[in-house]
Amino acid sequence: MLDFIQRDPCQNQDLSNFINGSCSPLIQDIKSKRARNLLRGISDPTNFSITKTALSKIKNSCDYSDYKKAVTYVRTNKFFKDNLVGQLNNCFCPKGLPESIIYTLKEICQQIENNSNQLVKITEKAISLLSHLKNNEFNEALDCCHTLIDEGGVSIFLIRKLSFITNRYQALEIDDKKILEKIDNLKIRINISNASFIEEAVTQLSNLRTAHLAVHKRINDIKDDRPFVNIAKSFIKPIPSDEDEFIRTLNGYYSFSLFDAFLYIQITNSMNLPFIAPYYIFKKYLQALYDDISRVDFSPEKMYLSIDENTGYYYLRECFLFPEQSNALKFLSIHGHYYTDWKNTPSLTPFAKNNIENYFNGISRLEHICCTEMDNVEVNYHKYDKKHCGMLENSTALIHILNKNEGDIGKDEEVLFVKLMSFTRDIGEICKNEYLERIADSAEDLSLKLVARCLVSINNKKQYAEYEFRSITQEYCLTKFNGNLNELLKHLFEVSPAVAEHFILNCNETFLSTLFHLMDKPVDALKVRADMLHWFGEVTHDERYIDRAKTLRIDIQVNKEKGTIDDSRIYVDSFKFTQWFEDNMVSKLTMTLDNLILSKNKSLVLDWDKKNSSIGSLDSVIEHLLACYHEFCANSIFGIASYLGRRIRHGTFGGTAITEVSDLAKNKEYLHLFDDRDFKLKFDTWLRNYELMIEDLVKTSLQIKSRKKPNGLITTEIDSAIKKQHANQLMYEILSVYSSRTGVLRLPIVIMDYCWRLAESDLRIIRNFLSEKKATHAVFSYTPKNISTFRKREYSKFTQEINLVTSKKFRLMSSWFNKPSYASPSTDIYLLFRAVVSEIKESVSHFTPCIALDERSFLITGGTYYVIYDALYVLIHNAARHGKQNGRILFDVSNHEDRNALKIKLCTELPSVAELHLAQGKIEKALGDADDNAHVVEGNSGIKKLKKMERDGSISNIKFFTNELDLLLSFEFIFELNSRGKYENIDN
């Protein structure tokens, strides 16, 4: 530790090495002759690879102190000023060295003293930059960035400020493309690609479109000790827990620039940390300049267009961009301590503890927290204010109380806790699981018990947690709502809309199907899910929930019409996969795709092996796509694993492979052959080895590869060249699809299609593996000795028949591992038509139409076929009510000649010409009237709804005409294959 530096900063230095207040160590200061020779042997001082190799040799063969001196020599000698190792003061972003070099605080402070004159110039330019930023003078601020670079001020400080300007451009809705051009030019000038990890960390943490806690977790989960990683972790956790963390973080900043190290020392110096002695800089003017930096205050009133309940959250996300400001540092130390992934909650330092206790002084009960609409919101730096707080402050106040009371809340506070869920955010992610468990276990109020179990389920995916959530859901529903889940949902919405939304997201089809006291049949889970989604969509005016409810109902009807699933090949339930995608992945993936598109990366470097070692928007997209493929393969409910469970673990494979083979040996025709002891021993040994081979296949090879099944042949990783090729194509396809207006709806279709392409490479391996096993273990041979020709023929016949059986069985089993023909989410429009007719028959008992479709089919892929279903329902329902009860219905589908669309025609028969004319008049009137009162939900909808669908863009070119000769009323309309109707703005 260092209390005070007292010697001349350039003592014992040549005058030639002391220019403008900076000095470089002499090469003679390095004791090791080998180290000196390696430095002198660097033939090209601009070559990063040569320099890095020389320094690596010094590190591995010389004393560590000489290694540090060698690095300092490179970073302070103008001879190396263009090298990517970097100088102490840079005009471009350095790449640095791959491993941390640990200098002491004293050594780094010495360099600050040695370079104080240059640091003064850099700091003055930084103050000028901050002054313009404070007043939202962004063009002037960007000009200051150039002067800062001219002085060697390229730094983490500069990267943060560029991100701050980018965020202001979006938050303040600035319409000045020149600002973005200037930012891009600055990034090019400083070669920001050399520090892509830092840039992505800054962007991801401060970008309001990313999932903040997810980014936190990804950064915290990086285990290595690279300098840039330590810097990124300090963005999340600005207060070091101990001296070791402080020194490692300081060296991270020092590896980038001396100016960053200077700022970090000053920031931590203001915290009065017990393990860091106060450091005083000799040059008072430099100290005074830092004081000026710390007094520049970025006001939320100027940072955002307006202040509302979410502004505090936005401000917290950006505080790390200007931690030199005391208000920002205080706000970050208080709320950043609580608003983080609870598994990575930082230890409480005296600095943070003092700030937290002062801020939440007097806040000890839930009644002290705001539980009403948040008006007149302010961002409070110094003290929690119930009357003016936002969602962030309320959330951290709740966590503060729960932490102080270790999860204990009073019985009189139980209902209030539930209501607070509408005035807080992310409690399930930032509150310790043990506290939520304690609340759930001790709660007397069933709504609190349910809410707590809901929150626990966010981070705890263990079976016990799901069992508890399932148990309380059934108990509450049966006790209070007579087993009606929709009534429970309505009650939760009255108590807290946020709780209701979280509840409905938890109640996916898989979860609902396990509520055995509420669901008689698995299909009931789909019906209940559809009812819940539809009600929630209506009450919140969110069309997407209504859309999903429609799709569910249609799939129920279609599945009923077509019967059971063909189980002859490997299978993934496309419907359930799509539901999982919409419940768990669509918001995450669309957010990261938005950020990737906004980042304007001109080239994509796709690394499918990173495994959470990076944090950029592209890396986030890769992470989410890998998660999709993992579920596609390993999900035991709808993935390939579920098929393997049915085919493999439940005995089908073993029974198919073994039963007929062993039965053949018991055939009366061949029993006498087993009187031959030599033959019997040979066959029994072969059969035992054959059975062991089949058993080994079942237990080890025909599995999803995992830690428990390391020899599984189906892997959830992109681990081969062909898989990487398909994965790359998937990325480009997604970016192409997502930019179109049908992007969001088509994502699960595209992803599932490519998941099958990825899996196909493993399926091919399995088929080849089965072929090898057949050749080595499934061929029986026996050559008898000293017997008649007739007996030889008997042995030969048995051998041939055994081998024919094993060949047939292996061909059959190999065929199971082929991609099914119905792999993509799709439906046959004629099947859709039959499903509509069946549904209407259930509600209109006298409706018995005459339909002749033969074996026609017309496959449509995608999630928008509910539009066709709606239109057909309107027309066929009208036919059922007003047409001939046993009349003809003609249905035809064809491709449109000129565009990517379908022409759909439906003809229904009426009883008489008079009825035909009456229907014609009613239809003409309905099509001419306003459609504002048209029904939105399937049911007793009429022609007005059809017209409304046309106005919304779901269908087009509605025509109707009559045929008096055949008594037919015909409708025709166009369905655009890329139509999204009223939902087409969802991408925006």
Image: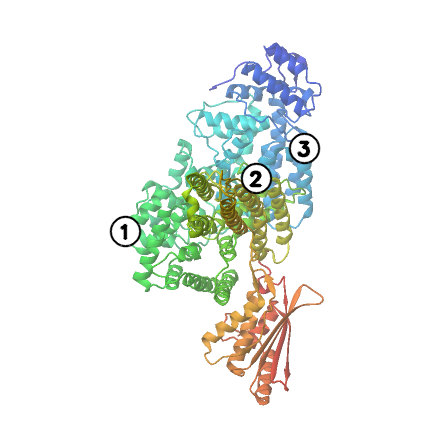
Relative height, residue 264 to residue 935 (above, below): above
- Quick check: can you spot residue 736? yes
- The amino acid type, in three-letter code, at marker 2 is Asp
Q: Quadrant of residue 871?
A: bottom right
Colour convention: rainbow
Mark 3 or 1: in front is: 1
User: What residue is disc 2 on?
Assistant: 719
Numbered tag placed on residue 147 in the rendering: 3
First along the sequence among labels 3 and 1: 3
Do the numbered discs 3 and 1 sit on residues whose CB atoms are within 8 Å? no
User: What residue is disc 1 on?
Assistant: 411
Going by the image, does 242 lie left or right of 886? Answer: left
The residue lying toward the viewer, choosing from 360 and 984, is 984
C-alpha span from label 3 to label 2: 48 Å
Secondary structure under badge 1?
A: helix
C-alpha span from label 3 to label 1: 62 Å
